[in-house]
Amino acid sequence: MKGRMNSRRIPVELIIFDLDGTLIESKWDIAEAVNLTLADLGLALRSQEEVFSFVGDGIKRLLRLAVGEENQSRYEDALRIFRAHYLAHCLDRTKFYPGVEKVLTHFADRHKAVATNKSLEYTTKILNGLGAHHFAYVVGGDDGYGLKPEPGMLLKIMEALNVAKDRTVLIGDSTNDITGGHNAGIRVCAVGYGMGNREKMAACQPDWFIERPEELMELFI
């Protein structure tokens, strides 16, 4: 499956990456922390696939969905309990996807940034454990710039690093990423190896659609 494919390699100065499902395989640790939280609250556990389907709009929405419509009064407790569990377990199985470090090293002379709907506290711990040195700027979902598909965090990164929109590209695995990039006026590359729905992503018309991180080295110069 391909998006609107460009026939030549595009010069870029700034590559902005989504985190979960794009840079890192994190779904196992998220599901573990969610179910530890539900167990502490005495609520029914969720299947891994259910939890995976909740990921993408930030931890707050994840937990609201996980506790269920009938248990929204337990949400604040869930948020507090989840924080402790996830901070304890967020690097148990979470790793860069195969090929990601090769790509980050290949583009060592470009600005690279992370724009994630995940809270900055979790994002910082994970990146510090895996390789924060690769990134010139990181924006999390609680930094005050809105959640993707709002363009705020993407615009903030470009402003902070002083890079023009036509020299910037966003890499992501969800419709929030693709639409957010479009809303920010930048090109978007969707990835098929993450947690996003492939058909829904394709319908959002990303500029590229790749199956392996290494393909980025063939798209950009």
Image (cartoon, rainbow, N blue to C red):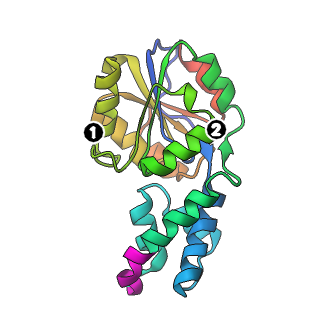
Picture coordinates of residue 60, whole percent (x, y): 39, 64
Q: Residue at x 39, y 87 (%)?
A: 70
Q: Secondary structure at mark 1?
A: helix
Q: Earlier in the sequence, mark 2 or mark 1?
A: 2
Q: Main secondary structure of the magenta part?
A: helix
As drawn, 220 above or below 30: above
- Residue type at mark 1: give it: Gly
Q: Residue at x 49, y 63 (%)?
A: 83
Q: Are marks 2 and 1 in contact (CB under 8 Å)?
A: no
- Residue 66 lies left or right of residue 25; in this view the side is left
What numbered label is drawn on residue 130? Answer: 2
Residue highlighted by disc 1: 152
Mark yes or no: residue 173 visible. no
Position of 118 compared to 9: left or right?
left
User: Residue 178: which quarter of the image?
Assistant: top left
Which segment did they paint magenta?
Answer: 70-77
Q: Nearer the viewer, residue 206 or 117?
A: 117
Foreground disc of the pair 2, 1:
2
Q: Position of residue 54 (x, y in %)?
A: 49, 64
Give the amino acid type for the residue marked by disc 2 in the picture. Leu
